[in-house]
């Protein structure tokens, strides 16, 4: 899962931000109860196949987060929107 840095408001202090916190996209999306699936180069072939099947069969709004390594040979005809983020 790709990390994203965000500023988190301090408890009870409106307008004041605490130190920068690093969360993964899955953690950020979980704040809105969005179901996430993750594919990366660390996934074994059976785990990759299982994750793709779970994403395709999911009946609720879901996001598939894929690293550049995990995208090779990926065919997702079930996806309605594709967002490609390239980091430098």
Image (tube, rainbow, N blue to C red):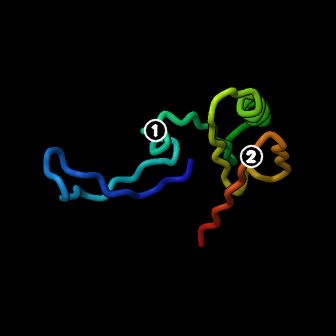
Q: Position of residue 78 (x, y in %)?
A: 80, 39
Residue at screen point 69% across, 48% down: 41
Q: Which residue is mark 1?
A: 32
Quarter of the rendering containing residue 52: top right
What x and y, as percent, mark residue 27? 46, 41
Return the residue nearer the eye: 71 or 35. 35
As helix, strand or loop, the secondary structure at mark 1 comes to loop
Vertically, is 25 above or below 55?
below
Q: Residues within 10 Å of mark 2 (few under 14, many from 20)?
A: few
Q: Quadrant of residue 48?
A: top right
Residue at figure coordinates x 59%, y 37% from the top left: 36
Q: Earlier in the sequence, mark 1 or mark 2?
A: 1
Residue 59: give x, y in percent of width and height: 69, 26
Label drawn at residue 11: none
Give above or below for 19 relative to 33. below
Element on which disc 2 rests: loop
Q: Residues within 10 Å of mark 1 (few under 14, many from 20)?
A: few
Residue underneath mark 2: 80
Q: State how many labels appear.
A: 2
Residue 34 position in % (x across, y down) = 53, 36
| Viewport quadrant of the C terminus | bottom right
| C-alpha span from label 1 to label 2 | 19 Å
């Amino acid at each position: 899962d790709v990390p994203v840095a965000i500023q988190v408001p301090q408890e009870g202090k409106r307008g004041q931000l605490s130190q920068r916190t690093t969360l993964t996209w899955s953690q950020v999306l979980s704040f809105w109860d969005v179901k996430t699936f993750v594919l990366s180069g660390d996934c074994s072939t059976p785990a990759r196949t299982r994750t793709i099947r779970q994403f395709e069969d999911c009946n609720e709004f879901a996001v598939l987060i894929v690293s550049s390594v995990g995208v090779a040979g990926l065919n997702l005809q079930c996806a309605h929107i594709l967002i490609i983020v390239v980091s430098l």
